[in-house]
Image (cartoon, rainbow, N blue to C red):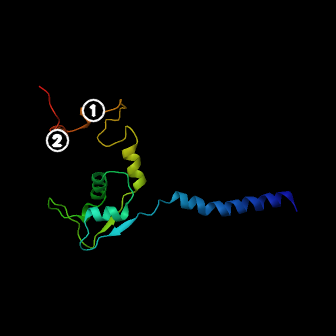
Amino acid sequence: MNMPTHSLRTWLCCAAVAAPLLALAASPAPRTTYQVVSGDTLDKVIKKTMPDSPLRIDILRNAFVQQNPQAFTKSPPRALMAGAVLNVPKHDDLLRSYMVPGNAPGNSGTLRGGGYSTADMNMNERKNWVRFP
């Protein structure tokens, strides 16, 4: 067999195999959705879609509300509307944003030693602290 022909065939085979993989890697991952049924609460939806999440439930609630404002009523006890289709937040993105030091929302971005900084908290979180005379 001729050497240049063999190399060309090898290159074409590799290109044919790699093209779908490159297209798959370039396309964004499909979003996971959940359709709300009557009687669903946000906590039920979170337990169904992210049952093993190590994140606090309030973080997951906020992520759902931020990604799906159209699915909630406008009144203060924000209830889910039956039939709404929710975009489920990507769990890996949430973990990266909340678990990496210095990247948590509300953090100023500077790495500090252990403990909390009062600059990262609002007054509502500090009002129940114990005060000494």
State the mark number for residue 63: none
Kindly identify the residue that appears in the image at 25 percent across and 33 percent down. Answer: 119
Q: Position of residue 22 (x, y in %)?
A: 58, 58
Q: Position of residue 111 (x, y in %)?
A: 37, 32
Kindly identify the residue that appears in the image at 28 percent across and 73 percent down. Answer: 37
Closest to the observer: 96 or 74? 96
Question: Which type of secondary structure does the marked residue at label 2 adopt?
Answer: helix
The single residue placed furthest to the left in the displayed view is 133
* Quarter of the figure with the C terminus: top left
Kindly identify the residue that appears in the image at 36 percent across and 58 percent down. Answer: 89
Q: Position of residue 21 (x, y in %)?
A: 59, 60
Q: Amino acid at mark 2?
A: Asn
Neighbourhood count class around disc 1 (C-alpha, 10 Å): few under 14, some 14–19, many 20 upward = few
Horizontal arrangement in the rendering, residue 20 relative to residue 45 (left or right): right
The single residue placed furthest to the right in the displayed view is 1
Horizontal arrangement in the rendering, residue 59 relative to residue 10 (left or right): left
Q: Which image quadrant is residue 87 in?
A: bottom left
Residue behind mark 2: 124
Q: Amino acid at mark 1?
A: Ser
104 in relation to 48, above or below:
above
Closest to the observer: 125 or 83? 125
Marks 2 and 1, Cα distance to the nearest angstrom?
14 Å
Question: Which type of secondary structure does the marked residue at label 1 adopt?
Answer: loop
Q: Earlier in the sequence, mark 2 or mark 1?
A: 1
46 in relation to 103, above or below:
below
Residue behind mark 1: 117
71 in relation to 54, above or below:
below
Horizontal arrangement in the rendering, residue 42 relative to residue 98 (left or right): left
Kindly identify the residue that appears in the image at 37 percent across and 41 percent down. Answer: 103
